[in-house]
Image (spheres, rainbow, N blue to C red):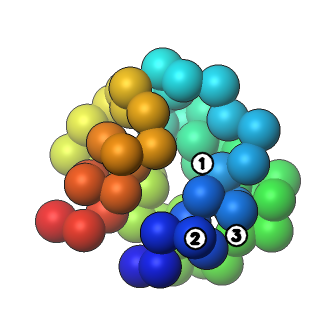
Amino acid sequence: MNPIEVQKHLKGASYPASKSDLVETAKGNGAPDDLVEAINNADTDEFSGPDQVMKALSG
């Protein structure tokens, strides 16, 4: 996933953030379904920051 696009869709997120908070933020920012699903399927339940989000999404 493109990091710039991911961060655009997570604009306004406050970290640390729970998975459900990021899913709601992404949906509110018009994120595509595959991004929402990827966040929802991440192995962690809380993210310390954008770097951790990208690490979780990239596998």
Q: Which mark is in front, 3 or 2? A: 2
Give the distance between the C-alpha atoms of the residues marked 3 and 2, in whole angstroms: 12 Å
Determine which residue is flagged by label 1.
23
Q: Secondary structure at mark 2?
A: helix
Q: Give the structural element (helix, strand or loop) at label 3.
A: loop
Q: Residues within 10 Å of mark 2 (few under 14, many from 20)?
A: few
- The reply to whether residue 41 is in sight is no
Q: Which residue is mark 2?
A: 4
Examine the image and state in which quarter residue 30 appears.
Answer: bottom right
Q: Quadrant of the C terminus?
A: bottom left
Query: Is 43 left, or right, of 24 in this rendering?
Result: left
Residue 2 in the image: above or below residue 44: below
Q: Is residue 30 left or right of residue 8?
A: right
Measured along the vertical axis of the image, is residue 49 above or below residue 39?
Answer: above
Residue pointed to by mark 3 = 31
Q: Quadrant of the N terminus?
A: bottom left
